[in-house]
Amino acid sequence: MAVSLPLFLRRALPFFLVRFLMRLCFRVEVKGLDHLIAAGSRVLIVANHVSLLDALLLSAFLPRRVLFATQASIANRWWLKPYWHVGDAFSLDQNNPLTAKKMVDALKSGRPCMIFPEGRMTTTGGLMKVYESPGMIADKADAPILPVRIDGLQYSFFSNLDRNVRRQLFPKVTVTLLPAQRLALPGDVKGHKRRLAAGTALYDLMERALIEGVPYSTLLRQLMATRSVRGGASVAVEDAARAPMTHDAFMTRIFTVAHALRAYVSYRERAVGVMLPNGLSNAVSIFAIQALGRVTAMINFTSGPVRIVQACRMAPVHVVLSSRAFVEAQRLEPIVAVLEKEGVRLVYYEDLMASLTWQDRVAGFVKARLPICWAAAGLPDDTDGAALMLFTSGTEGMPKGVMLSHRNIIANGFQTGVRLGFAARDRAFACLPMFHSFGLTLGFFMPLFFGARTFLYPSPLRYHDIPELVYDTQSTLLLGTDTFLSNYEKHAAPHDFYFLRFAIGGAEKIKPATRLAWAEKFGVRLFEGYGTTETAPVVSVNSPLHYKAGTIGRSVSCLDIRLHPVEGIKNGAELVVRGVNVMLGYVKADRPGVIVPPQDGWYNTGDVVSVDADGFITILGRTKRFAKVAGEMVALGAVEAVVSSLWPDARHVAVGLPHDRRGEMIVLLTESDAACVEALIEPFRAQGLTELSLPREIVHVDQIPLLGSGKTDYVRAKELAEAALKRDA
């Protein structure tokens, strides 16, 4: 006993002192320790790497004696050597099989082990490159992996984040342990392929841990939390007027406008509409409505008077925020007249700002500088409550209202941002309209919540101006459809996209010609993604770490997918999803204001896809965009792809129309004068398409009809095709 007690003290005392000091300074909170107990002793613990203190933190607060593997650059620091001398740690080389074998042997002997799969501290706050070796260690030792999320130390002076994040002397630290899981690796995969599969599975596990650990709140509280991290003096948003607004000024304007807006919004109003272009007025209005505890309804001003009135009835909306200058510039007077006739009151932003009293300004200034708990006092704090209403584009029929919760939007912003490696140092160029979920979440909310500077531009159609502005603002994120991106490429100088890290294409398939042109002219990879309004919107996206041209990438974390067979389609299935970013439900015209949730949380996208062994998804077409010709299902998207490869400078749309003998026939609408059926026969055969896939008729049009979001208006396209055939009959 006399010998063992000093030995015990020599080993235990350093850990006790470190635990005491870190709890005192960083107010350390540990969650989920029961998961470590349930995992047993043969378990590999993995954690995100945010600071120099990570290993010290975990060694002090994990209840078991764990064997730590740390990178040499950290383990050999002089001020840590004495601590590790009494503990259990060794320097790990991710590429050295001998050090990996040491951990495998330790796990097999029943010793819990700990490793940082990234191999280095993060510089973005998200995941860095994840090495495959920890996955192989767990696989060879037949051990489950227990993911740990460390949050808070990235804001300390011991982190490696850049100067865009405000450092704190002693930030609050949270350590969250999640349930242990075994890597589901195929039994028939061996060698290098198994190593890659283990690395991908481990990456997914760690990414999921980061997303599940996001401290969800309401949109307004999330913005205020970002301000506290970035600092009030940092720039939050800027628009075409080129007057950057800091976080402090942005919050002040939000609360000031909200205070003045109370006079126009009764307590009965559940939703308030916004009909504004991308700009500071739009950004402020969205959050000002949130500051009143109301739902923000984004009005698509390009959809026409009839659909706008239907949207207002669905929500229902009786007050709409707009701008006199915007209405005049876009000639929206007919829409205004119809709305006023419907009993909808328009509040103009210019009038609202001109009517501000000193009480409004003082209230806004004071509230913006209060702690979050006081500034948001009295407002709903339900993260699963209704936050925003968008309206489907109506590409194939009547639009519906889509109710999104605070959690839906915040989660999808982080799902996408973490997958891409987006960071506070990035700058977003947001020109896609914010009544579209693609432009709203990825162009506005995601950059804001990551603390990145956002430039709001009113239209994506200014092909000459946008490339120059992207260069001038040093933007690193640009969103667009294939149509927009191909036009930017044609009008841009080779240096205009010098700063771009992420050029993301969605809403329509990226043509190979567009992808190649961007790569050759700018050296920029286009990251194609896929989403729907109902999923806030991103379902999948290619990223720097996981990229496969021609696909829409791998599904984002915390989103479950199912594949439902479709009769007549052999190589694809209908995509059905469920997860944190799936909508609260639809609001339909026959039941205004009533949210109809998806059955059991599963949303049927209506898209037919195929998924390869690596998890990359390929869109084959929409269920409604298949034509049944002589009993065979023909993907209209496949027809369009072949036609586009022949005449890439024009737009083309294939539609299915009734036919007396075949059931349906394919009609091609095209902007190309050169398009003809004879020129399609050989290319169709080369792509493995049968003669049934050939368009029976070709209709030449001056312009393919588009929606305001840039997507094809299939309803209008079908009407044009029907009218053309009747005219020629």
Image (spheres, grey):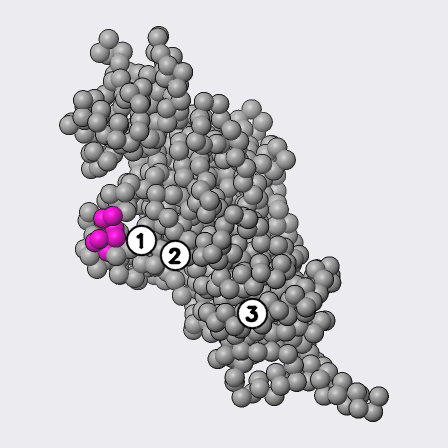
* Classed neighbour count for the residue bearing mark 1: other residues with Cα under 10 Å, few (<14), some (14–19), many (≥20): many
Residue under the image location 54 percent in, 81 percent down:
75
Which residue lies at the image location 50% right of the left edge and 50% below the top edge?
189
Where residue 484 sits: x, y (%)? 28, 43
Q: Earlier in the sequence, mark 2 or mark 3?
A: 3
Q: Predominant secondary structure in magenta? A: helix
In the image, residue 514 above or below residue 519: above
Badge 3 amino acid: Lys
Residue 101 is marked as: 3
In the rendered image, the residue lying farthest to the right is: 1
Residue at numbered disc 2: 544
Mark number displayed over residue 192 = none
The answer to whether the residues at label 1 and label 2 have Cβ atoms under 8 Å apart is yes
Name the residue located 26 percent from the left edge and 27 percent from the top edge.
685
Question: Is 197 above or below relative to 55?
Answer: above
Q: Nearer the viewer, residue 458 or 490?
A: 490
Residue 469: percent from the left, percent from the top? 26, 56
Residue 191's x, y, as percent? Answer: 47, 56
Q: CA distance from mark 1 to mark 3?
A: 38 Å
Q: How far apart are the alpha carbons under marks 2 and 3?
A: 30 Å
Amino acid type, label 2: Pro
Q: Is residue 51 magenta?
A: no
Quarter of the figure that contains the N terminus: bottom right
Quarter of the figure with residue 688: top left
Numbered disc 1: secondary structure = loop
Determine if residue 215 is in view: no
Looking at the image, how many numbered discs can be counted on the residues?
3
In the rendering, at what x and y percent does residue 353 appear? 43, 52
Say the numbered circle drawn on residue 525: 1
